[in-house]
Amino acid sequence: MVEWKNLDTLKSYQELKDTARVNLAEVMSGENGAERVKTYSVPMAEGMAYNYAAKAVDDNVLAVLAKLAKEAQLTEKFAALYNGEVINTGEKRLVLHQLTRGQLGDAVVADGVDKRAFYVEQQKKVAEFANKVHAGEITNAAGEKFTTVVQIGIGGSDLGPRAMYLALENWAKKHDTFKMEAKFISNVDPDDAAAVLASIDVAHSLFVLVSKSGTTLETLTNESFVKDALAKAGLDASRHMVAVTSETSPLAKSDDYLTAFFMDDYIGGRYSSTSAVGGAVLSLAFGPEVFDRFLAGAAAEDVLAKNENLLENPAMLDALIGVYERNVLGMGCTAVLPYSQALSRFPAHLQQADMESNGKSVNRFGEPVDYVTGPVIFGEPGTNGQHSFYQLLHQGTDIVPLQFIGFKNNQCGVDVDIQGSTSQQKLCANVVAQMVAFACGKEDENRNKYFAGGRPSSIIVGDQLTPETLGALLSHFENKIMFQGFAWNLNSFDQEGVQLGKVLAKRVLAHDTDGALKAYSELLNI
Ligand SMILES: O=P(O)(O)OC[C@H]1O[C@](O)(CO)[C@@H](O)[C@@H]1O
């Protein structure tokens, strides 16, 4: 039986606050630093590793974090989750996204259905559909093949699938598995839909409408926008659209779509990339086999998250080092810095995954907590970020923990050797340089050129970004966020904080306003 306790009631948390601080610049210099880089590393799935040498921890801090993991019953709470307990207390729902890629524990039966079997059935349905589209068995009304897939959705119904698509686009082209180009419409700004529609041939485009609730204003508006464009082109919209939704949503079983694929209320939007939400667009774009490989990578990483030994569990270790930085060292942000252009939207996906999950001030029982919770997440691919916001990261008054991601090899296999090094080597050299610069800093009599160091970072290293490593990477962060939510005693799986704005926007559109709402409405000419 697990006990849900606030972080500040744990003995180990008090102990953590009393542990001696680590001087990162000192421990990372010289041979000691070299030794840390070799030993402070945990294997991840698919040949990757989580290296935390440049974090402000030592064996003492790690030992107390291991006590905290036990006292907070992180392993037991994860088991409760994957065995089907109601972990999302706010909405009284199970939390089953791991089940879309594997069975970690007991069979989970909900609403009279074996949930693993249900998700697999939907994946098969998506795969059959995608294969028929690729084979020209499902075509437009003129009997011509679809060449483009356009996903319409927002938040979790956009960010994850979009980030995953961009992550694998070049890999799929290189490996001859690129089937259809994918585009995404999310913003209710009419310029978003208009620009995408102007860039495609609508007659040969298949639109995937994704909304778990089937009620999201932006998505339904963009659906109408697209239907209007199809009608203007003399096309029957129902021959060009499929839906991904929950079986209870208004979009289920509608004649407006060629077919519908289902997820359910037990898959949070921001955790839905491995369900039909990501499955439809990724299987259409790259083929169902590539999507299966992506799921296999996520499943393998999920298994590692079950390990109760903190030093062998990369997601739990990453999570607890994050809690230490946030709650003991007082650091309020985390930057996600992939040294991989293919991961250009990965930080944006993690922004939702993390901030919508752990941006909470009350615990899972609705009681205010007396400690800080989820950090602000932002990021950009390196090396672009270096020429943008790294100035503040190196010399600003706030210390921002950094989460680097890097690969030894690029995806396209095209590179040039200029001045004795390839572009890939230059990319990797930069991430190495940054990690040491942040940790060790640099003395200088001129304070303007002085780097204090002591700025913590970790790196996830892999051979190459492939469907498997991408799946493992996604799972790592999903599980990290989950473990942090457990440590903070939050419900990481609802998002009440997005509701108020939606309600007020409806009032503005209905001209039911007064005070500042009315004045701002007039300012924006609504
Ligand atoms: O898939 P839906 O139901 O359209 O929701 C889209 C997004 O909206 C949110 O509920 C936030 O408003 C996200 O959590 C979700 O990913």
Image (cartoon, rainbow, N blue to C red):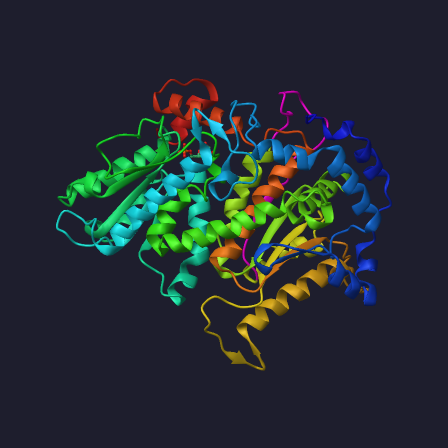
Q: Quadrant of the N terminus?
A: top right
Q: Nearer the viewer, residue 107 or 10?
A: 107
Residue at screen point 56% across, 58% down: 46
Q: Left or right of 236: which side holds 36?
A: right
Q: Position of residue 105 (x, y in %)?
A: 57, 37
Task: Look at the image and give the residue range highlighted in magenta.
Answer: 360-382
Against 265, is 160 above or below?
A: below
In this picture, residue 331 sits left or right of residue 92? right
Choose top left, top right, bottom left or bottom right for residue 480: top right
Q: Residue at x 63, y 69 (%)?
A: 429
Q: Nearer the viewer, residue 440 or 125?
A: 125
Q: Position of residue 355 (x, y in %)?
A: 57, 38
Give coordinates of residue 80: x percent, y percent: 61, 31
In this rendering, the count of numbered labels is 0
Residue 370: say if magenta.
yes
Q: Main secondary structure of the magenta part?
A: loop
For the view shown, which residue lies furthest in the bottom direction? 420
Could you say where residue 177 lies in the image, as x and y percent from the top left?
36, 61
Residue 293 visible within the image: yes
Residue 195 at least partly seen: no
Ligand 1 located in image quadrant: top left
Where residue 144 sits, quadrant-wise, is bottom left
Is residue 271 on the magenta stretch? Answer: no
Quarter of the rendering occupied by the C terminus: top left
